[in-house]
Amino acid sequence: QGKYNLRSRKTLETVYLHYEGDRECEEFKAFEVYLKRIWFASGIHHHYGCEKFKPGFSEEYFYHLLENIGEKLLPIKRGETKEDLMRQLESILFDPEVMPKRVNQTDGEDLVLTSACNFYEDVTQEEVERFYAKMKNTDNPNPPSYGLNSKLTKRNNEVVELTWKEDGLYGETIREIVSWLLKAQKYAENEGQKHVIDLLVKFYRTGNLEDFDRYSIAWVEQHEGLVDFINGFIEVYGDPLGMKGTWEGIVEYKDLEATKRTQTISQNAQWFEDHSPVDPRFRKPEVKGVTANVICAAMLGGEEYPASAIGINLPNSNWIRQEHGSKSVTIGNLTDAYNKAAQGNGFRDEFVIDKETVALMNQYADITDDLHTDLHECLGHGSGKLLPGVDPDALKAYGSTIEEARADLFGLYYVADPKLVELGLTPSTDAYKAQYYTYLMNGLMTQLVRIEPGNNVEEAHMRNRQLIARWVYEKGAAEKVVELVKKDGKTYVVINDYEKVRELF
Ligand code: ZN
């Protein structure tokens, strides 16, 4: 996520463990808050907002803290002094001009040079695009995900790819991953799982993306057993060009009772695809192998920790999804925790327009929220197809946001469909209104609590929610389908015509 994140975190953690001065003063409290934010975001940038955190204490105090710490405890490299470390971190942590954004998606700027993510070094966006354009052979119907597992940089003025593999970049860490995978393999429930682990280990050893595709195909076709995992360089949201995967890991087990819900949805996947309101050229004539489970996360790591997704649909490779299907999970123990945390915290009383809507949400928001996640993951991302010859990365910086919008819209459209009542998934034809209100209130207003005033929405899922909610608000403005009204100096979302909202979705 950033070249200096681990170094920054290790330094601050050392202070936290060993500082012997006053820990009760304002500045130390501010230091603790800053360190907690770094722990939660796994780096010096907000995990959603992407902007660099501003420390609530001064540079002078930072120097004071470090002066108290013995040199041997700090992550000082050979040939470097403590003074060097302090000066480097001072500029990285405090200077607002240095690495201001983790992922920059501002149109017209060089997205590679202006993003702090650690996927590129000394190369421009144009050089990156030229490098991968040469690799992408559009004649290959089954292209690997070029660039997924490497850093792009320069050696002797030539652009080179440093591959993340056992004897490549991050080799020491990757050998550690491999050794734990081999230990886990002994406890596999069946031969199929053992084979999947073999293929993943092979990929970590060779760094060959075709090995990763072979692993992904075996993984997506492996359904037996109660336990499954996700492990690898998976999601590309951390790269402004949407190519490079951030490492993540999950170990999960099935929630058999709740899985009946997602199985009903996936068994009807073809019906949903056939009735989808998109241009028929983009519908899949035959939906393949959408498997959907509600699972409990037993362990989260890398990009999935501590801030985790609540639903995941993989693999990301377009041609594998088309030919072999995809596996989709809703992480039931996390959504359950979110729902419980939201009960009685006063949020709805504060932000929702009236008591009737609050009552509607109290009755149906949890169930329709889960359903929206299921529809988004099992059907939304798995739905549709590209026209032949279209580069899956063609949308560049817009790609992640539009892919999320596509999946969300699929869910929003269908959560109101009478088919869900017929399938026994929603208790009444009105239940969807709770999801529509929640969604529009979040997109138009309440998701912004995560953003510092004056900053832009940067993260792909948040951009997508804003995109959909604003679009519906604007397109429905003439007929007052959705309004923002002021009451006692506060702004509220009002939905006047739920059926129209569905049409707009
Ligand atoms: Zn998604």
Image (tube, rainbow, N blue to C red):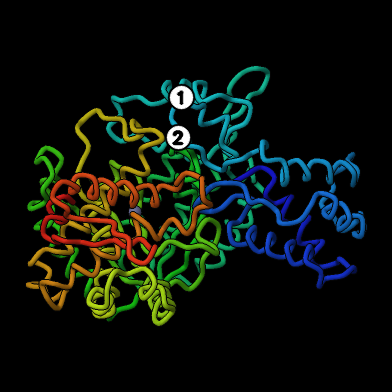
Mark 1 or mark 2: name the one nearer the start of the chain.
Answer: 1
Pointer 1 and pointer 2: residues touching (CB < 8 Å)?
yes
Mark-to-mark CA distance, 1 and 2:
9 Å
Q: Residue at x 44, y 59 (%)?
A: 230
Residue position for label 2: 241
List x then y, in percent, for residue 115. 56, 36
List x then y, in percent, for residue 283. 13, 44
171 or 126: nearer the viewer? 126
List x then y, in percent, for residue 261. 22, 73
Secondary structure type for disc 1: helix
Residue 477 seen from this side: yes
List x then y, in percent, for residue 142. 30, 36
Residue 217 seen from this side: no
Task: Tell me the quadrant of ligand 1.
Answer: bottom left
Q: In this view, does 35 lie to the left or right of 468?
A: right
User: In this picture, is 498 found above or below 364?
Assistant: above
Label 1 environment density (alpha carbons within 10 Å; few <14, some 14–19, many ≥20): few
Tag 2: amino acid: Leu
User: In this picture, is 109 found above or below 49?
Assistant: above
Q: Residue furthest front?
A: 488
Residue position for label 1: 129
Tag 1: amino acid: Glu
